[in-house]
Image (spheres, grey):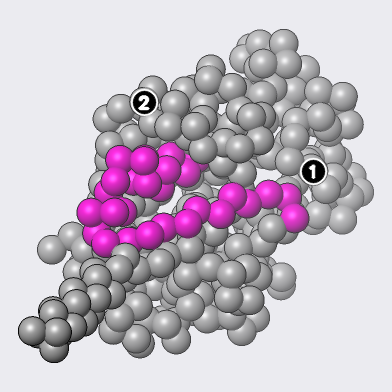
Amino acid sequence: MKYVLAGITALGMAAGVAQAADDVTLQLKWVTQAQFAGYYVALEKGFFEEEDLNVTIKAGGPDIAPPQVIAGGGADVIVEWMPAALAARERGLPLVNIAQPFKSSGMMLTCWADSGITGPEDFPGRTLGVWFFGNEFPFLSWMSQLGIPTEGGADGVTVLKQGFNVDPLIQRQADCISTMTYNEYWQVIDAGVTPEELVTFKYEDQGVATLEDGLYVLEENLADPAFADKMTRFVRAAMKGWKYAEENPDEAAMIVLEYDETGAQTEEHQKRMMSEVAKLTAGSNGALDPTDYERTVASLLSGGSDPVISAAPEGAWTHQITDAALN
């Protein structure tokens, strides 16, 4: 009888091990905010748990570069903009896009209307605030396509290395600054500026929109069936979270606030952000649209003598995960 009980106990332990959830670490591109609501919703609503996943979401920040984190083994999957991911791939880090929750670009240049800027033809001679740390690539590509040098001078633009705030515009240090439709633009408005005092140029409207906030993993890991299965379940749950967030923006914003350990975010800003982010994820089921990819690559290659990438990438994206997740 003791032998039988021992056997049963051993079988029970084995079953427990087999049922243990798989760990997944996601590195975000920026701090906890509604830009990443789909992942927090999936965590809070148990969508990851339903897929037998134990997901850890790591917030980003000004000193955190997702490609460096995944290269160092600190994450299984990262949220990154495609220009930065492709540039990193060309430099030797084999990042692969496995899903694209964001269908549209939220990046734009926001300028003072009284600066006299009415179109890109008015940029020469101006000071423009630009984010770096991988976020500068869409801007540099745009200027290259316009034939505008970025080293200053009457025929070029002076690039002000912009922090992740709107101070350069408010303090009149720059004629224009980089903003997102869902974040920094509204920080300018909250600072007491009216929309009528501003002129905005959405990258998407200028024909230089590049894909943002895709999910990337290391190419070598996709060769492991267990890892690929884990990512399939992760993407399926994440997209369920994103669609829930689109349909319930206010609830999604409140969920994000629950996970903001800094306490820096406000309810008003996060609800507004979520309503804007929902416009960017709308139309995506998670699978990368090859047309959007080709548009991004074409934009990055069209930099004249100094393109963001020097050749069209190979193997930089796959439908392997989304095909399995969506089917």
What is the CA distance from the residue labelled 2 to the residue labelled 1?
32 Å
Res 261 quadrant in image? top right
Residue 323 placement, left or right of 141: left
* Picture residue at 28% right of the left edge, 37% below the top: 244
Three-letter amino acid code at the position of disc 2: Glu
Q: Position of residue 14 (x, y in %)?
A: 23, 79
Residue occupying the far right of the picture: 153
Name the residue nearer the viewer: 62 or 203: 62
x and y percentages locating residue 152 in the rendered image? 89, 50
Question: Is residue 50 covered in magenta?
Answer: yes
User: Do we see residue 288 in this rendering?
Assistant: no
Q: Is residue 44 magenta?
A: yes
Which quadrant does the N terminus fall into?
bottom left
Q: Disc 2 or disc 1, which is closer to the eye?
A: 2
Quadrant where the C terminus lies? bottom left
Q: Are marks 2 and 1 in contact (CB under 8 Å)?
A: no
Q: What amino acid type should be assigned to the residue bearing mark 1?
A: Gln
Q: Residue at x 69, y 58 (%)?
A: 64
Q: Which mark is residue 251?
A: 2
For marks 2 and 1, the one nearer the N-term is 1
- Residue pictured at 68% horizontal, 49% vertical: 61
